[in-house]
């Protein structure tokens, strides 16, 4: 019984959820939270753990001087031509869903990254960029930043979800895949049975990166996981209460897939939402006012079989989002009596 008490102490009390000032108004960091989990949790399938993620993870910087990205409609592109820089300044306010860099998100505990990529028109070669309305940084640069963090935190694991590819030829895909191999090398986890992926398994093999590639090219590379292994249902609503209903419904259906699962706790602006909040932007007009409702749902969740797995949010620094999700893992610990 004494051994149970000791194990229980280390599982519940031994935390590295320390508080530090990260700049940008961010106070909390969870740089080594995975490596600090107790053996009960690190031996569980990773699909049963609660993992914080970010939506449009790369959008902390977008280029107002570059062309409008190919994920936008012809109407938006036409308006951008007419109104030029003014239109792009408005687009920037609604395209940016994060304020923190990859490094800052990682330090704060984010381990899932939602990535949308594209080539840039008229540019020679096969360089690929992050996009959301406007072009962001080169993918190669972002991956390098993530890799440097992983080198300093060898027990931390990230999910990289390349779920949208725009204006990419076969050569662009070859270039991007070669870049992933070049940057991460031995850290790339080969596609496997989801139930067999635990932190213990990843640590033993030196794996730190699980790449999901929503494209047929995933079938040609053993270290690319197909998109079917990480469904991320999208509510596509600006109503927080409809979002909660959707999250509950899709969470109840996750057992059908036998995969990782992403709960996108995000709101999507409608045209009228953007018109009414034209100057304010996504954060001030839509996200902040609905965060209490969304966070109440997050706090009420439990990971485990049929429970939450990955939860994503916009502007992850506005509340203690990552720490809240990480703490959900305590609910998986056995409630052992202390005698």
Image (cartoon, rainbow, N blue to C red):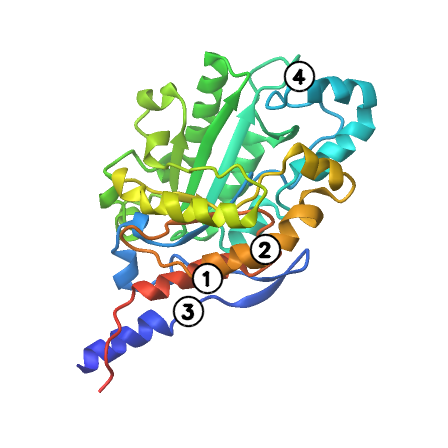
Residue 236 visible to an observer of this rendering: yes
In the rendered image, residue 9, in percent from the top left (x then y), is placed at 31, 76
- The residue indicated by pointer 1 is 299
Camera-near label (3 vs 1) is 1
**Would you name the residue on which mark 3 appears?**
15
4 and 3 marks in contact (CB < 8 Å)? no
- 226 and 34: which one is in front? 226
Question: Which badge, 4 or 3, is on the more N-terminal residue?
Answer: 3
Q: Is residue 209 left or right of residue 46?
A: right
Residue beneath disc 2: 291
Instruction: Give the CA distance from mark 1 to mark 2.
Output: 12 Å
Separation of disc 4 and disc 1 at Cα? 40 Å
Circle on res. 74: 4
Question: Residue 312 at what x, y percent from top left?
Answer: 49, 47
Front residue of this view, candidates 143 and 81: 81
- Which comes sooner in the sequence, label 1 or label 2? 2
| Mark whose residue sits in front, 4 or 3 | 4
């Amino acid at each position: 019984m004494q051994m149970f008490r000791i194990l229980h102490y280390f599982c519940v009390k031994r935390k590295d959820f320390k508080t530090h000032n990260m700049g940008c108004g961010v106070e909390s960091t969870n740089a080594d939270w995975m490596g600090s989990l107790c053996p009960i949790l690190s031996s569980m399938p990773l699909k049963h753990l609660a993992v914080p993620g970010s939506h449009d993870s790369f959008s902390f910087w977008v280029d107002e001087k570059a062309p409008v990205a190919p994920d936008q409609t012809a109407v938006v592109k036409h308006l951008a031509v007419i109104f030029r820089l003014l239109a792009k300044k408005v687009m920037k306010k609604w395209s940016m869903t994060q304020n923190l860099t990859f490094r800052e998100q990682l330090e704060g505990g984010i381990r899932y990254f939602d990535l949308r990529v594209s080539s840039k028109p008229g540019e020679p070669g096969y360089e690929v960029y992050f996009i959301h309305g406007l072009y962001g940084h080169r993918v190669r640069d972002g991956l390098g930043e993530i890799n440097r963090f992983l080198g300093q935190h060898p027990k931390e694991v990230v999910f990289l979800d390349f779920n949208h590819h725009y204006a990419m030829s076969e050569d662009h895909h070859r270039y991007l895949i070669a870049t992933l191999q070049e940057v991460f090398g031995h850290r790339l986890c080969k596609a496997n049975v989801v139930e067999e992926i635990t932190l213990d398994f990843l640590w033993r093999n030196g794996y730190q990166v699980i790449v999901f590639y929503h494209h047929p090219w995933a079938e040609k590379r053993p270290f690319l996981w197909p998109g079917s292994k990480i469904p991320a249902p999208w509510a596509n609503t600006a109503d927080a209460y409809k979002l909660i209903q959707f999250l509950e419904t899709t969470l109840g259906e996750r057992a059908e897939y036998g995969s990782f699962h992403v709960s996108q706790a995000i709101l999507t602006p409608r045209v009228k939402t953007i018109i009414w909040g034209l100057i304010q932007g996504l954060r001030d007009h839509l996200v902040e006012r609905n965060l209490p409702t969304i966070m109440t749902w997050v706090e009420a969740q439990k990971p485990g079989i049929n429970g939450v797995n990955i939860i994503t949010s916009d502007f992850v620094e506005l509340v203690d989002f990552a720490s809240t999700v990480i703490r959900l893992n305590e609910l998986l610990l056995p409630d052992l009596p202390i005698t």
